[in-house]
């Protein structure tokens, strides 16, 4: 194989990667699992909205983490270098601290 042919074969899979689908498992803190199949180029904010409506929660009240890092609205499976069947963790946003009730 010539160098030119070798370079082409390395480039082609990357080009179709963005349109390739990936399976993502979203796991809640209670262990509930929801599966999604999305394109590697799809913004994860779309998945977050779909998950929130599926479980009946406001998307602003839950946080999505991949490998312990919070997912931003512009992240995609491709930008996070996610693999097929990777897991996203969902946490309920907790606000507050100590509630003092006077006697």
Image: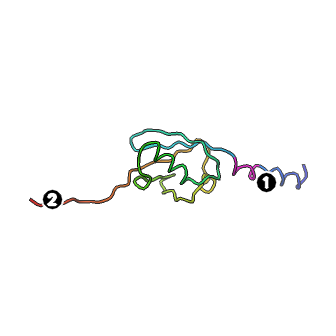
Residue 43 placed where, x, y %?
59, 54
Q: Give the range drawn in magenta.
A: 13-19
Tell me the residue that label 1 is attached to: 11
Residue 60 placed where, x, y %?
42, 56
Q: Is residue 89 left or right of residue 98?
A: right
The structure residue drawn at horizontal position 41% and vertical position 47%, both measured from the top left corner, is: 57
Q: Which mark is residue 101?
A: 2
Residue 3 placed where, x, y %?
88, 55
Instruction: Answer few, some or many: residues within 10 Å of disc 1's Cα (few below 14, many 20 plus, some between 14 and 19).
Output: few
User: Which residue occupies the extreme left position in the image?
Assistant: 103
Q: Is 46 colored magenta in this rendering?
A: no
Residue 55 placed where, x, y %?
43, 42
Sequence-first disc among 1 and 2: 1
Q: In the image, is residue 49 above or below residue 74?
A: above
The structure residue drawn at horizontal position 88% and vertical position 51%, both measured from the top left corner, is: 5
- Secondary structure under the numbered disc 1 in the rendered image: helix
Q: Tell me the quadrant of the picture where the C terminus can be found.
A: bottom left
Q: Is 15 colored magenta in this rendering?
A: yes
From mark 1 to mark 2, how far is it between C-alphas?
64 Å
Q: Image quarter for residue 4?
A: bottom right
80 or 74, which lies in front? 74
15 or 45, which lies in front? 45
Name the magenta segment's main secondary structure: helix
Q: Image quarter for residue 98?
A: bottom left
Q: Which mark is residue 42?
A: none
């Amino acid at each position: 194989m010539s160098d030119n042919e070798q370079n082409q074969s390395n480039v082609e899979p990357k080009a179709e990667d963005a349109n390739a689908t990936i399976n993502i498992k979203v796991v809640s803190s209670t262990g509930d699992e929801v599966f999604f199949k999305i394109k590697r180029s799809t913004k994860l904010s779309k998945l977050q909205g779909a998950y929130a409506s599926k479980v009946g929660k406001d998307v602003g009240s839950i946080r999505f983490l991949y490998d312990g890092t919070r997912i931003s609205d512009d992240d995609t499976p491709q930008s996070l270098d996610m693999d097929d069947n990777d897991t996203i963790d969902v946490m309920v946003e907790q606000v507050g601290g100590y509630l003092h009730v006077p006697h």
